Amino acid sequence: QVQPVESGGGLVQAGGSLRLSCVASPRSFSDRTMAWFRQTPGKEREFVAAITGTGNSTYYGDSLKGRFTISRDNAKNNVYLEMSSLKPEDTAIYYCKPVSRVGSTWYPYPFSPWGQGTQVTVSS
């Protein structure tokens, strides 16, 4: 399995926007639901958004829909996360990962490696 490579993070003021990108493993990419997660020190990793293989269905974590938009380009094995109206509480390292869903819970593929993530810092 190829490690995902996330990019696009940075320092932005509250109310600003960022676009994150992820280059994922080409193996069965278009068949896989892909997701973004985020994590801050001392907290559990949090589900942000997911998109099905065809791109026809998207899902968002609580309170994120309307500010975040997930998309994908299967020809490039890329997943994107458009973030707007950013808040200081959005500060985290953001990761992308293939996922599966059981009920309402999203589970990262256990044998797919995590990437290094990309740091998003929102100043007040």
Image: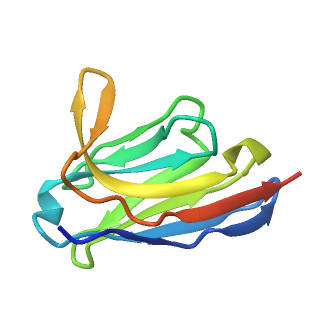
Q: How is the image coloured?
A: rainbow
Instruction: Relative to 25, say whether 59 is above or below.
Output: above
Could you tell whether 1 is left or right of 73 in the image?
A: left
Residue 23 image position (x, y, % from top left) = 34, 73
Could you tell whether 25 is left or right of 9 in the image?
A: left
Which quadrant of the figure has residue 57? top left
Which sits in the foreground, 52 or 28? 28
Residue 43 image position (x, y, % from top left) = 59, 35
Residue 82 image position (x, y, % from top left) = 55, 60
Query: In this figure, what is the number of numbered marks?
Result: 0
Residue 28 image position (x, y, % from top left) = 10, 63
* Residue located 57% across and 38% down the image: 64
* Residue located 60% across and 31% down the image: 63
Outermost residue on the front side: it is 42
Could you tell whether 46 is left or right of 59 in the image?
A: right
Outermost residue on the right side: it is 124
Outermost residue on the bottom side: it is 76
Instruction: Relative to 79, say whether 69 is above or below.
Output: above
Instruction: Relative to 93, say whether 42 is above or below.
Output: above
* Residue located 24% across and 48% down the image: 52
* Residue located 18% across and 52% down the image: 111
Which sits in the foreground, 74 or 21? 21
